[in-house]
Image (cartoon, helix red, strand yellow):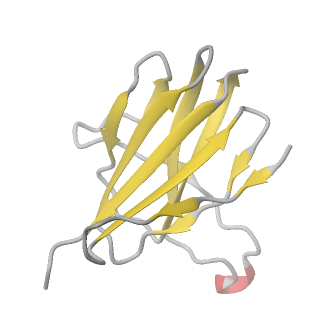
């Protein structure tokens, strides 16, 4: 089991848009990315092989607050209130309803290698 660091993808847009990517399997753990200040977060799933189940998780607690070495992550919901738990056979983009300090995808079933992108945006002040 490996911890997979997110790779930030440079964009031609300004600093109001951030994109990260992970390539991982169900045996891996995605390192979270800090999305504080970016209230709009969308997970885009691209699968390279067979099916697996991907969750978008988030936390409002930074590491080290109140002695927490590892914050608890919860599965986030889409704007309709449905948990973002998706089979990679349903390739697409899924927007989270909650704003979080940090988010990370997780794979809970299957043996596929999945390519995941996370888009975080904010409005210009």
| Residue positioned 60% across, 62% down in the render | 32
**Residue 96: horizontal and vertical position, in percent?**
33, 49
**Residue 89 vs residue 56, the one in the foreground:** 89
**Residue 72 vs residue 107, the one in the foreground:** 107
Q: Is residue 104 above or below residue 35?
A: above
**Residue 104: horizontal and vertical position, in percent?**
56, 54
| Residue positioned 76% across, 42% down in the render | 28
Q: For this view, does 68 lie left or right of residue 116? A: right
**Residue 119: horizontal and vertical position, in percent?**
36, 55
Q: For this view, does 67 lie left or right of residue 89? A: right
For the C terminus, the image quarter is bottom left
| Residue positioned 59% across, 15% down in the render | 51
The answer to whether residue 59 is seen in the rendering is no
For the N terminus, the image quarter is top right
| Residue 14, picture quadrant | bottom left
Q: Is residue 114 above or below residue 50?
A: below
Q: For this view, does 53 lie left or right of residue 44? A: right
- Number of residue marks: 0
**Residue 52: horizontal and vertical position, in percent?**
61, 21
Q: Is residue 64 above or below residue 17?
A: below
| Residue positioned 41% across, 75% down in the render | 36
Q: Is residue 121 above or below residue 36?
A: above
């Amino acid at each position: 089991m490996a911890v997979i660091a997110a790779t930030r993808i440079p964009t031609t847009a300004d600093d109001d848009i951030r994109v990260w990517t992970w390539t991982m399997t169900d045996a891996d753990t995605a390192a979270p990315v800090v999305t504080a200040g970016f209230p709009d977060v969308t997970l885009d799933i691209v699968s390279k092989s067979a099916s697996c189940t991907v969750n978008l998780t988030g936390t409002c607690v930074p590491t080290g607050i109140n002695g927490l070495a590892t914050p608890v992550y919860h599965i986030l919901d889409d704007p309709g209130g449905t948990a973002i738990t998706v089979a990679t056979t349903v390739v697409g983009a899924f927007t989270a309803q909650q704003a979080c300090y940090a988010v990370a995808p997780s794979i809970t079933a299957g043996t596929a290698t999945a390519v995941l992108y996370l888009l975080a945006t904010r409005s210009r002040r």
